[in-house]
Amino acid sequence: MATPAASAQQYRGALHEMTQTTPTCLWNDSASLDELTDAIANGAVGATCNPVIALTVLKQEMATWKPRVARLVEELPTATEDQIAWRLVEELSVRGAGLLRPAFEAYRGRNGRLSIQTDPRFFRDTAAIVAQAEHFSRLAPNMIVKIPVTRAGIPAVEEATYRGVSINATVSFTLPQCLAVAEAVERGLRRREAEGKPIEGMGPVCTIMVGRLDDWLKVVAERQGITVDPGVLEWAGVAVFKKAYRLFRERGYRIRLLSAAFRNHMHWSELVGGDVVISPPHAWQKRLDASGIRPVSRIDAPVEPRIVSTLEERFAEFRRAYSEDGIAVADFDAFGATRRTLRQFIGAVADLDALVRDFLLPNPDK
């Protein structure tokens, strides 16, 4: 699919070409203002913030944010490090949302949104997720709120949707999770419609963290001593995404799919052409633009049957991820990729708290 390296320069701007010639949208997987500004110039119409991203941005842009953190410490004399840390997440998100307002207005709410993630520590508490989702949705008109696809997250998706919150389902890797999200959104939308409440300006999406499913199967392969042809495991997330996209269209779900957690170019190139969102980190956007790969519609091109059959035969975890009834909602929290991702997100919250702690209680030994 890729062109020779010598001609790569001819195709720089592939993501911008995609946004201009296909229905596939580009969102920026970062809330850094510099990165988002550049991505918008390349056609991006959305962005993301979560504790991992907030921690990265604050560390990279500490010279910019240090005075603001110090002011928050003074303005909130009784606040805990955790409360100040979440204020920073909110402020990062609001700033990013401001850059996206023109797209939000142009797309009438379907795009132009900033994804802000609910506290991952709430993954078992439906009421806490919904309450924070409502709070986040009020921070700016163009917020979209990330809710984890856990046992408690599914009812939270429905209730938040019913309350008028545009949701971005996250911590999602499998077809059963995507279908549960789509059905929950439909229930929420139908409840709103039955009461005469508007839905036209809402823009829900369901993320598939395609690369994290690939990562998990590689862990399983190492643990179980499974050997497959090189490259087979790079297709797992793509296969799930393509199947989910087909079923979403067949069933008329009013929610789009979003590809995230990039590990290879196929997490973009194989999904171009669909009415979906592609959300690569800024560094991946640069790599894809320089790759020489053209944004040709491939969303309907099936993954090679040999690859899918190999994954199904060798990996029970792939069968669970690829089958409509492979995982029950009650078992979402136990899926390996879910546990690994939640642990990372929760760990990032702790690291973000530690960053703020150095402002509240500077280390006297340094």
Image (cartoon, rainbow, N blue to C red):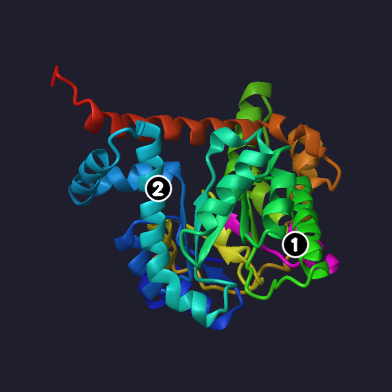
Q: Which residue is depicted at the point 59% across and 74% down?
A: 296
Q: Name, please, the residue furthest toward the top.
A: 365
The mark nearer the N terminus, 1 or 2, is 2
Based on the displayed image, in which of its 4 quarters is residue 7 positioned? bottom left
Q: Visible in this render: residue 260?
A: no
The answer to whether 280 is drawn above or below residue 261 in the figure is below
Q: Which residues lie in the magenta part?
A: 243-260
The answer to whether 143 is drawn above or below residue 85 in the figure is below
Image label count? 2
x, y percentage for residue 366? Answer: 13, 21
Tell me if 317 is positioned left or right of 41 in this view: right
Distance, label 1 to label 2, CA atoms, is 39 Å
Q: Which residue is depicted at the point 48% across and 58% down?
A: 280
Q: Which residue is depicted at the point 47% across and 76% down?
A: 103
Secondary structure beneath label 1: loop
| Residue 302's disc number | 1
x, y percentage for residue 60? Answer: 26, 47
Near mark 2 (Cα within 10 A), the count class, few <14, some 14-19 or many ≥20, is many
Based on the displayed image, in which of its 4 quarters is residue 80 positioned? top left
Toward the viewer: 83 or 77? 77
Residue 248 on the magenta segment: yes
The answer to whether 4 is drawn above or below residue 106 in the figure is above
Tell me if 342 is positioned left or right of 92 in this view: right
Toward the viewer: 166 or 196? 196
| Residue 89's disc number | 2
Q: Quadrant of the N terminus?
A: bottom right
Residue 271 on the magenta segment: no
- Amino acid type at circle 2 is Val
x, y percentage for residue 36? Answer: 37, 64
